Amino acid sequence: MCVSLGVQLIIIFSLFLTGLAANNSLIRLDLSSNSLGAHSTRALARALTSQRALTFLSIADNVLRGEEGGIAARVLIECGVGLTELLLGGNELGQVRPPDLTSL
């Protein structure tokens, strides 16, 4: 059976998220320039709900765009309980801006 590259990447990302959810000591995570879109970012947010040690996350230079990208970034901020620094630069979030981390 031949599995397409897209399906392989989805499987790999899913396995990564499973491992991330189980990791209790990760402090910094840089996922910049990985072509993550809104769907991937929401899945990442779900994996981060159990993270207490993670304080730095970069999802800069991905493909978060417009309102959908802004909403995904907001979900990530709200689920990333220990985050103190979130890099979003290089995404085209348009008029939708996630809240300031200090307001949470």
Image: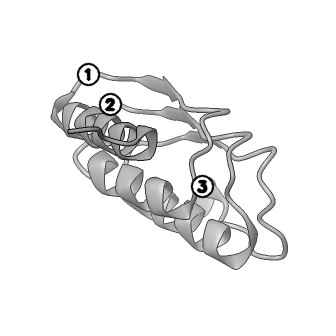
The answer to whether marks 2 and 3 mark residues whose Cβ atoms lie closer than 8 Å is no
**Which residue is painted at 32% across and 47% down in the image?**
48
Q: Secondary structure at mark 3?
A: helix
Instruction: Please tell me the numbered disc located at residue 101.
Output: 3
- x and y, in percent, of residue 40 in the image: 46, 54
**Which residue is painted at 43% across and 38% down in the image?**
5
- x and y, in percent, of residue 15 in the image: 23, 35
- x and y, in percent, of residue 79 in the image: 38, 59
Quote the CA–CA distance across marks 2 and 1.
Answer: 6 Å
The answer to whether marks 3 and 1 mark residues whose Cβ atoms lie closer than 8 Å is no
Q: Secondary structure at mark 2?
A: loop
Would residue 61 appear left or right of 55 to someone viewing this image? Answer: right
Q: Which quadrant is home to the N terminus?
A: top left
Quote the CA–CA distance across marks 3 and 1.
Answer: 21 Å
Amino acid type at image mark 3: Leu
Q: Identify the residue position indicated by label 2 in the image.
A: 53
Q: Nearer the viewer, residue 99 or 31?
A: 31
Q: Earlier in the sequence, mark 3 or mark 1?
A: 1
Q: Identify the residue position indicated by label 1 in the image.
A: 25
Q: Is residue 6 visible?
A: yes
Amino acid type at image mark 2: Ala
**Which residue is painted at 30% across and 57% down in the image?**
46
Q: Is residue 72 above or below residue 60?
A: below
Of tags 3 and 1, which is closer to the observer?
1
Quote the CA–CA distance across marks 2 and 3.
Answer: 16 Å
Q: Secondary structure at mark 1?
A: loop
Q: Nearer the viewer, residue 36 or 94?
A: 36
